[in-house]
Image: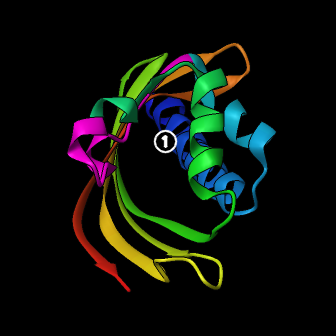
Amino acid sequence: MDILERLTAVEEIKQLKARYFRSMDTKDWAGLEAVFCPDAELDMRGEAADKSKAAEGLVIGAAKIMPFIRNAVTDLVTVHHGHMPEIEITSPTTAKAIWAMEDLLRWPEGAALKTLHGFGHYHETYRRLEDGWHIQTSTLTRLRVDIT
């Protein structure tokens, strides 16, 4: 790949991740499913409050990932931001990245939790398909979580 192709791929991956965040926060479930490869893997095992159920946080397949996320956030107001991506194009059809992230989740009135304010990183791989770049694997790691 020449430099222009690499820079174009980096920009397309940035746009992909922006669609991921926007789709989740606006509850655009079809848009959210579309950012993933059909055989994608989402690893949220580190998010499990009950560590005995952590294995349930590894979800395989875009058709299963979208409802997993929807079930987790559908009743919440969410705001997700991705920052300072470290994107490496590994071939014309593959890439990997680490994104600094911050999220704010607010539960409905009367819920046991009020807010979660988290900080961490997404570790991801990407694959270019006929219709563009998609998330192949995504793992969320957190540095800090403030809960009220």
Residue at 39%, 78% (x, y): give it. Answer: 117
Q: Measured along the vertical axis of the image, is residue 2 above or below residue 147?
A: above
Q: Residues within 10 Å of mark 1 (few under 14, many from 20)?
A: many
Residue stretch in magenta? 39-53
Q: Measured along the vertical axis of the image, is residue 61 above or below residue 5?
A: above
In reply to whether residue 46 is colored magenta, the answer given is: yes
Q: Measured along the vertical axis of the image, is residue 84 above or below residue 68?
A: below
Left or right of 118: which side holds 27? right
Q: Quadrant of residue 62?
A: top right
Residue 37 rendering spot, x and y as whole percentages: 58, 21
Q: In the picture, which quadrant includes the C terminus?
A: bottom left
Residue at 49%, 16% (x, y): give it. Answer: 93
**Residue 25 seen anywhere in this rendered image of the structure:** yes
Pick the front one: 101 or 93: 101
Residue at 69%, 33% (x, y): give it. Answer: 33
Secondary structure under badge 1? helix
**Residue 125 seen anywhere in this rendered image of the structure:** no
Residue 17 rendering spot, x and y as whole percentages: 55, 48
Disc 1 residue type (three-letter): Val
Pick the front one: 93 or 23: 23
Pick the front one: 97 or 47: 47
Residue 21 rendering spot, x and y as whole percentages: 60, 56
Q: Quadrant of residue 138?
A: top left
Circle 1 sits on which residue?
10
Q: In the picture, which quadrant includes the N terminus?
A: top left
Residue 132 rendering spot, x and y as whole percentages: 67, 25
Left or right of 78: which side holds 83? left
